[in-house]
Image (spheres, grey):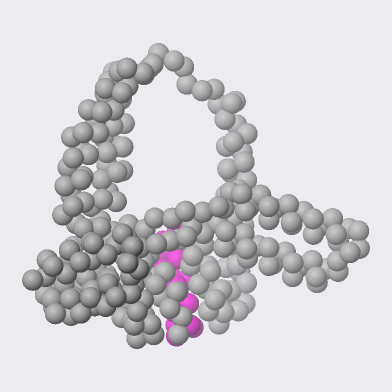
């Protein structure tokens, strides 16, 4: 029975690794845990300042709003686009399917101890409670932002922040709706269009790029002809639809914008060579 469980766990692990290798992904990194603790202390300090008469009610509310804005921004992951070579990704994926289970089995056989009991829940209670508190804090801030936007529906930057916040919370539908409002209200904003396009690309099934995402990135190229994400994905769309000349033009321009030591230069050059 225990080996059946191990096999199922290995299959899940392999599946989780294969998924990003076989389609475009968005990776993120954040200092949200540390920053959230600092901002929570600042909110408590504001309350103490009000009690001591150092801040008025209006000043305190303004300070809380600004800190909450920073908390939301901190909770959002820094995003970057990376489009792996599909064929290379599949070769790596197939290698993982074969090698990873064998390696894991050998490693576990030498060091594993399935007879040991699980860590008691009591030992994890404090950590779980802290995670729930952090999640509730972020959810509360996002809900308050959404309520404020009902009263100020023309706040394009507010809708953009709500879109990023919903995305960080995993609410894709809410993020798409908020980003859609933001791009209408911010006609010259490049970052919000790139963020929205990344979200849509992350939902793609790999057979074709979402038309709406490509349209947003084409708008970006009008506003900023050297924007690297737009150059890459609009070029990729051209290559996938058979317009090799356009793809080569856009990717060549992308090469000109990338630093000489950029790890992406080799990949882009390979894709240009593959068009010939």
Q: Which image quadrant is residue 175 in?
A: bottom left
Side (left or right) of 128 relative to 264: right
Q: Is the magenta stretch mostly helix, strand or loop?
A: helix
Magenta-span inclusion, residue 113: no
The answer, for residue 231, to whether it is visible in the render is no
Compared to 252, does 187 lie above or below?
A: below
Side (left or right) of 165 relative to 12: right
Q: Which residue is drawn at 55% across and 52% down?
A: 31
Is 147 in front, or is 125? 125
Compared to 135, does 64 lie above or below?
A: below
Residue 101 locus on image (x, y percent)? 24, 30
Side (left or right) of 149 relative to 253: right
Q: Magenta segment, which residues?
A: 168-187
The answer, for residue 159, to whether it is visible in the render is yes
Is 215 in front, or is 97? 97
Q: Which image quadrant is residue 126 in?
A: top right
Residue 77 locus on image (x, y percent)? 48, 57
């Amino acid at each position: 029975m225990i080996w059946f469980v191990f096999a199922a766990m290995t299959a899940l692990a392999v599946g989780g690794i294969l998924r990003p290798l076989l389609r475009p992904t968005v990776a993120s990194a954040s200092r949200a845990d540390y920053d959230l603790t600092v901002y929570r202390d600042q909110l408590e300090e504001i309350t103490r300042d009000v009690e001591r008469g150092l801040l008025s009610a209006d000043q305190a509310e303004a300070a809380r709003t600004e800190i909450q804005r920073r908390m939301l921004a901190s909770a959002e992951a820094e995003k970057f686009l990376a489009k792996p070579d599909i064929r290379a990704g599949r070769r790596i994926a197939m290698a993982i399917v074969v090698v990873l289970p064998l390696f894991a089995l050998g490693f576990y056989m030498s060091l594993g101890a399935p007879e040991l009991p699980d860590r008691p829940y009591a030992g994890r209670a404090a950590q779980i409670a802290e995670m729930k508190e952090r999640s509730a804090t972020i959810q509360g801030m996002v809900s308050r932002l959404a309520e404020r936007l009902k009263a100020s529906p023309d706040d394009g930057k507010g809708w953009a922040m709500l879109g990023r916040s919903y995305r960080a919370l995993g609410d894709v539908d809410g993020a798409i709706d908020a980003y859609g409002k933001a791009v209408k209200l911010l006609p010259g904003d490049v970052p919000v269009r790139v963020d929205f396009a990344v979200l849509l690309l992350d939902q793609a099934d790999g057979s074709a790029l979402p038309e709406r995402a490509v349209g947003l990135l084409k708008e970006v190229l009008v506003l900023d002809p050297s924007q690297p994400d737009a150059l890459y994905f609009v070029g990729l769309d051209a290559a996938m639809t058979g317009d090799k000349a356009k793809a080569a033009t856009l990717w060549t321009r992308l090469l000109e914008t990338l630093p000489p030591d950029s790890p992406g230069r080799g990949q882009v050059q390979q894709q240009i060579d593959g068009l010939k």
